[in-house]
Amino acid sequence: MRSGKLAVFILVLVALVIGLGGTSYIFYKRAKDLTANPQKLSQEENKKLVEAVGKLVLLPEGEMPTIATVTDASKLKSEQTFFARAAEGDKVLIYTQALKAIMYRPSENKIIEIAPLVIGSNSQGLNR
């Protein structure tokens, strides 16, 4: 009876060591890949963001947007009407060729604002 419990304990211990070793290897491999190409993670996140927004609204084709994150909504709200409903963490996809800006709130999976992009020396950037 005692040797049966010991065998089960050893079997569980071996499975645990193998599981932890495999998990450690996966994290090590991912960290090594990111060290070799640190922009890869950013590119993957941007691709996922564009895919999520693309499920909610028709996006301009043939152009990868510049992506910005709202970090201080209070400053932006007073400067431009585009940011009137902005919140910290919102993502802004800027399509310079299509002249379009899209504000997306990942926490709610919602499009907050879409506006034409005005580029010029007299403009402040995103206007309505």
Image (cartoon, rainbow, N blue to C red):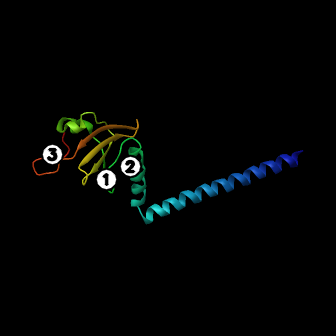
In terms of secondary structure, where does tag 1 sit?
A: loop
State the residue position of label 3.
Answer: 124
Q: Secondary structure at mark 3?
A: loop
Q: How many marks?
A: 3
> CA–CA distance between discs 2 and 3?
25 Å
Please report the residue visible at 15 percent of the width from the left and 45 percent of the height from the top.
124
Q: Quadrant of residue 23?
A: bottom right
Q: Mark 3 belongs to which amino acid?
A: Gln
Quick one: 28 or 53, which is closer to the camera?
Answer: 53
Residue identifier under label 1: 65
| Label 3 packing within 10 angstroms: few (<14), some (14-19), many (20+) | few
Q: Residue at x 63, y 57 (%)?
A: 22
Instruction: Residue at the far top: name it.
Output: 85
Q: Nearer the viewer, mark 2 or mark 3?
A: 2
Q: Position of residue 51 (x, y in %)?
A: 41, 48
Circle 1 packing at 10 Å, graded few (<14), some (14-19), many (20+), is many
Q: Name the amino acid, label 2.
A: Val
Position of 44 with respect to 114 (left or right) is right
Q: CA distance from mark 1 to mark 3?
A: 19 Å
What label sits on residue 113 in the rendered view?
A: none
Give the farthest residue toward the right.
1
Mark 1 vs mark 3: in front: 1
**x and y percentages locating residue 116 in the rendered image:** 22, 44
Residue depicted at 24% across the width and 41% down the height = 115
| Res 114 quadrant in image | top left
Q: Are marks 1 and 3 in contact (CB under 8 Å)?
A: no
First-in-chain label (1 vs 3): 1
* SS state under label 2: helix
| Residue linked to disc 2 | 50
Q: Are marks 2 and 3 in contact (CB under 8 Å)?
A: no
